[in-house]
Image (cartoon, grey):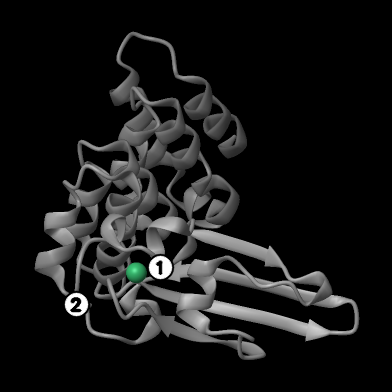
Amino acid sequence: MAGKPLADCPNCSQLAANTYDDLMDGSRPHDAIVALLGFPPPGGAGTVCCPTCGTLYEFEYDCGFMEHDISLRRISPTEAGAPIDVERCTAELAHANADTRDYAALCLASHHVARDDHGAVIELLRHDDATVKIRSIVTVIYSKCDVRPYLAAFIELLFDADPSVRGNAARIAHYHMAVLRECRAEILDGLKRQAGDGPLPPDAASLLADLR
Ligand SMILES: [Zn+2]
């Protein structure tokens, strides 16, 4: 990972975390996609690294009869089996641009989750910035890791001031219900402690209802 922040890259600043383009009629994809993959793009799937900013993408180009779909998804160095610049990513968590913070959080969360560095993951989940929190939450949920060490942090996140943070934290129930049921007593305790005398926020209440 070398180069400038994603926000200052003429290619990556034009692309979303997930980009999709339909090249029906042999049309050219977005210039930023051409800069990364060339034209015509290679058929099939693979990974590509932006030469300007070092952002990594997984791409897929389905080219067949009536099908010319191209998709790119930002991936972390950990997912790509590439080295990570932890210092650079940590600095970019405080960048003014939300997309840059989002990618830095993906890179760091993915790295720390893979190494079972629970303290570092929890620090990201408790970060001040909602963009960093949400990307870290989603990375933990999708990583298929053991979520037990993160349950206390997730309970806190169900009470976050930001509704998007609360909603994303509640998605843990869809993907890790078996573990949540096993840790039911701990979760009930945590929710009670966090709520105090007040009511449970809707996301926490619905998670609790699912656990019963
Ligand atoms: Zn770039």
Residue kind at label 2, given as amino acid type: Ala
- Compared with 156, 81 (above or below) is below
Of badges 1 and 2, nearer the viewer stands 2
**Cβ–Cβ below 8 Å for labels 1 and 2?**
no
Q: Taking the image as drawn, is residue 149 in sight?
A: no
Q: Nearer the viewer, residue 185 or 177?
A: 177
- Compared with 18, 135 (above or below) is above
Q: Taking the image as drawn, is residue 202 in sight?
A: yes
Instruction: Give the residue number, with chain letter if any, for mark 1.
Output: 145
Instruction: Give the residue number, with chain letter if any, for mark 2.
Output: 2
163 relative to 131 in the view: left or right: right
Quadrant of the rendering where the N terminus is positioned = bottom left
Q: Distance between the Cα atoms at labels 1 and 2?
A: 28 Å
21 relative to 117 in the view: left or right: right
What residue is rendered at 48% in x and 49% in y? 180
Where does residue 93 sit, x and y in percent of width and height? Answer: 20, 51
Where does residue 74 sit, x and y in percent of width and height? Answer: 44, 67
What residue is rendered at 20% in x and 66% in y? 4
Q: Earlier in the sequence, mark 1 or mark 2?
A: 2
Residue kind at label 1, given as amino acid type: Cys
Q: Secondary structure at mark 2?
A: loop
Figure quarter occupied by ligand 1: bottom left
Where does residue 145 sit, x and y in percent of width and height? Answer: 40, 68
179 relative to 2 in the view: left or right: right
Residue 131, quarter of picture: top left
